[in-house]
Amino acid sequence: MIELLILFELSKKVLTMYGVSKEIRADFSVLTTPSYGTIKPALNRLEKGGFLKTQKTMSEGGRPSTYYSITNDGIKELKRLIVEPPLENPIQFLPMARVKLACADVLDVEAQRKMLRELRVKAESIIIDTQNLMSTKELQFYPKMVFDNLICEYKNFVSLLEGFEHACTRE
């Protein structure tokens, strides 16, 4: 997820590592707040992959600064990361899906439709799996409430996706 967030922020403007962190926090703090210890290695991986380029300068205070910018391959990688199939792990699915939705404006309408369809199918699958689990097990009060809440959360998410899909069909 961190690579997607970095590429998304750098698709808007050239930034230092501090600037990347600040922009991610400003745009995504309700979804995630990655540390510098996560951002720096991801910037290095993206640069090694040819998705970023760097420019080193001296700041007015005489300190070295590294500015990161996205390459054409980086734009392609950003789009690929957004439309890649959803994660199989249900714990990771919803946070990642929300980040992808928040970045979806960089995609063309057809790619948006594909992403929305895949996210909806996976969310519906999680609902069915949870309902099946609840119907085959005698659950205590707390687990039952947790799974009921999970079903509600995913049904709300499916409704959101259907609204986005409807909006895409009008474009």
Image (cartoon, rainbow, N blue to C red):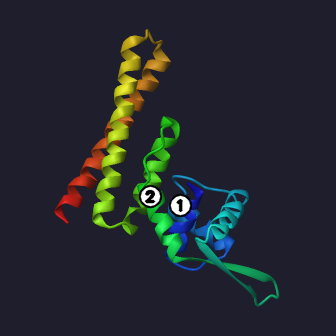
Q: Secondary structure at mark 2?
A: helix
Kind of residue sitting beneath label 2: Ile
- The answer to whether 7 is drawn above or below residue 123 in the figure is below
User: Tag 1, which secondary structure?
Assistant: helix
Report, in whole angstroms, how far the alpha carbon at label 2 lies from the one at label 1: 7 Å
For the point 61% across and 77% down, the residue is 15
**Residue at x-position 40% and y-position 68%:** 106
Q: Within 10 Å of the Cα at label 1, are there few (<14), some (14-19), or many (20+) other Cα atoms?
A: many
Earlier residue among tags 2 and 1: 1
Image position, residue 23 (x, y; %): 57, 69
Q: Is residue 162 above or below residue 68?
A: above
User: In this image, 152 relative to 66: left or right?
Assistant: left
If the image is split into quadrants, where does the N terminus sit?
bottom right
Q: Which residue is mark 1?
A: 4
Q: Identify which amino acid the numbered label 1 is placed on.
A: Leu
Question: Residue lying farthest left?
Answer: 170
Residue 66 position within the rendered picture, expressed as x and y whole percent measured from the top left: 71, 79
Residue at left offset 79%, top offset 82%: 64
The x and y percentages for residue 59 are 75, 87
Q: Which is nearer the eye, 108 or 134? A: 108
Report whether 65 appears left or right of 68.
right
Q: Which residue is mark 2?
A: 82
Q: Residue furthest bottom?
A: 60
Q: How many other residues sit within 10 Å of disc 2, few (<14), some (14-19) or many (≥20)?
A: many
Coordinates of residue 60 in the picture (x, y in percent) = 76, 90
The residue closer to the viewer here, 82 or 170, is 82
